[in-house]
Image: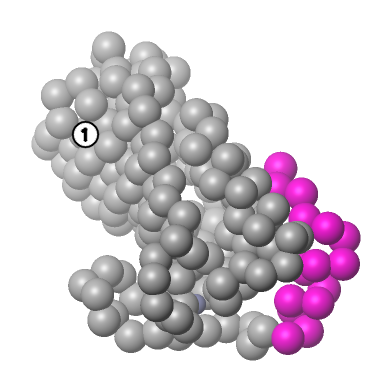
Amino acid sequence: MLRLPACLPLILMATLPATGLAGDLDGHAAHQHGVAQLTLVLEKNTVQIGLESPADNIVGFEHAPAKPGEKAAVAAALSTLRRPTLFGLNAEAACGKARTQAGNPFDASGNAAHRDFDVNHVFECSQPTRLNRLDASPLFKAFPRLQSLKVDYALPGGQGSVTLTAASPNAMLVR
Ligand SMILES: [Zn+2]
């Protein structure tokens, strides 16, 4: 779990608008607070999961972190986002975590009004033809500000899109 100082979320909720929208300036999916995008691609034995989320969903703010509590929140979020158990794949596919990567959106220069976390998780699966489910419940539990997750997946022989929520966090990967 991401632990924030008890006072921080209340202060941020009081000072930030409930939702924010930004245009699609950089070719990425539209930036909408409360919503994140996940792409899952299976090729041979390798599953690549890419997550792109507005920073607001993850740490509750998008301004450059200035206070010690804000910097600690970003560090804790990065640690959580790199956790091997952030996403679950059905056990029959026998997938193990190969590597994870999560960049700090606040490292970028400039003074962007909106910032996104970009996270990549790679799994190697010994039974990839049996991959049929993605479980995003650890992501929703870790980041309660995240309301919906749009999943686009591509497997050999099948592809599709599904929107997940905390109440419905499993994507069936149909082929
Ligand atoms: Zn934003």
Residue 151 image point, x, y percent: 36, 54
Looking at the picture, tell me which residue is in the foreground, 79 or 34: 79
Say above or below: 68 vs 153: below
Q: Looking at the figure, which quarter contains the C terminus?
A: top left
Q: Which residue is mark 1?
A: 42
Residue at the image point whose x is 30% and y is 70% from the top: 29
Quarter of the image where one finds residue 144: bottom right
Say above or below: 163 vs 20: above
Quarter of the image where one finds residue 24: bottom left
Residue 132 seen anywhere in this rendered image of the structure: no
Q: Which residues are magenta?
A: 1-15
Residue 162 image point, x, y percent: 37, 55
Residue 14 sits inside the magenta stretch? yes
Q: Secondary structure at mark 1?
A: strand
Task: Name the side, left or right, on which 2 lies relative to 126.
Answer: right
Residue at the image point whose x is 29% and y is 18% from the top: 125
The amino acid type of the residue labelled 1 equals Leu
Residue at the image point whose x is 69% and y is 53% from the top: 72
Q: Residue furthest right?
A: 6
Say above or below: 71 vs 39: below
Task: Name the side, left or right, on which 164 lies relative to 49.
Answer: right
Residue at the image point whose x is 57% and y is 83% from the top: 19
Residue 97 seen anywhere in this rendered image of the structure: yes
Count of number-bearing discs:
1
